[in-house]
Amino acid sequence: MFAKILNFEINNCLYLIILSILSYILGSFNFPIIVSKHFGKKKDIRSLGSNNAGFSNVLRSVGILPAFLVFVGDFLKGVLSVYIGNRFINNENISLETNYSVLLMFGFFCFLGHIYPCFFKFKGGKGILTAWAINLLIDWKIFLVLISIFLIFFAIFRIVSVASVLVAAFYPSVVFIFSNIATSNKILWGPTVISFIISTITIFKHKSNLYRLSIGKENRVK
C-alpha cells in the first residue's frame, strides 16, 4: 500500500515498516510531558493550563527553561525522522521524484507518535512544533509559505489556534504545488495524500479550540 501511494517499488517492505515504527516510537518521546514532570513539581502538563502537551502550554504553565527544552526536544525529533528518511532513500536508491514522499511519510509517523504517544497512554499534544521542524528540513520553501500564512492570520485574529487551523487547511494545497513544480510528465499524489492526513489530524486535534472560539472564549494574544 505504501509503495503504491508513494509511487515507487520497494524490494524490502519490511525495512520500510520497521523504520516507520521507529519514527513513531521516536515521536512518542513527548518532551512536554517528560519535561513538565521534571520541572513542574512532578505534575503532568496535561493537567495544567490548557491541558495540552505542547510547547506553548509548557511556557505558560511551567516556565521559560522547560519550554526551551521542549522546543529543542520536539525539533530534534523532526530532525531525526527526516534523517531516517534520508538513510532509507540512500540505501534503497529511491528516485528524486519520490524523495519528498518518503521524507514526509517518516515525518508523519514521528508527528503521529507525538500526538498519540505509546509511552503516555496515547494522549499527547498537537504536533505543531514537530510538524514545523519536519517541513523546514524537507523543503524550506514550503516552510516559508506556511509560516507566512500563519503570521498573516495571526496578525489578523491574534489567536494562535485560528492561525494554526488555517495553516493546516492550506497545507495540502501548498505541498501539492511545490512537490509537483519540478515534475513535468506526471503528477505526484503521495506528498499531497500524506499532507492531507496530517492536515486532517491537526484540525481534529484543535476541536476544543474551535469550540471555545464558537462561544467566544478562545484566548487572544494581547
Image (cartoon, rainbow, N blue to C red):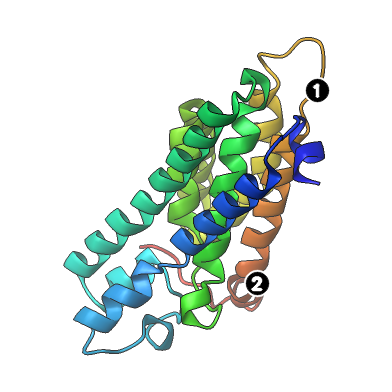
Residue at point 50% right, 26% down? 141
Q: Amino acid at mark 1?
A: Ile
- Residue under label 1: 187
Sooner in the amino-acid sequence: mark 2 or mark 1: 1
Total marks shown come to: 2
C-alpha span from label 2 to label 1: 33 Å
| Residues at marks 2 and 1 touching, judged by CB atoms closer than 8 Å | no
Q: Amino acid at mark 2?
A: Lys
Q: Position of residue 105 (x, y in %)?
A: 62, 44
Q: Which quadrant of the structure image shows residue 185?
A: top right
Q: Which quadrant of the structure image shows residue 165?
A: bottom right
Decide if residue 77 is on the left or right side of residue 85.
Answer: left
Residue at point 44% right, 79% down? 50
Decide if residue 86 is on the left or right side of residue 17.
Answer: left
Q: Is residue 66 above or below residue 6?
A: below
Residue at point 71% right, 35% down? 11
Residue at point 63% right, 46% down? 16
Q: Is residue 185 above or below residue 212?
A: above
Q: Is residue 122 above or below residue 18?
A: below
Q: Position of residue 25 (x, y in %)?
A: 49, 63
Label 2 residue SS: helix
Label 1 residue SS: loop
Q: Is residue 193 above or below residue 203?
A: above
In the rendered image, the quadrant that contains the C terminus is bottom left
Q: Position of residue 221 (x, y in %)?
A: 39, 62
Q: Is residue 148 at all visible to an observer of this figure?
A: no
Q: Which of the numbered marks, if any, corresponds to residue 7?
A: none
Q: Is residue 118 at all visible to an observer of this figure?
A: yes
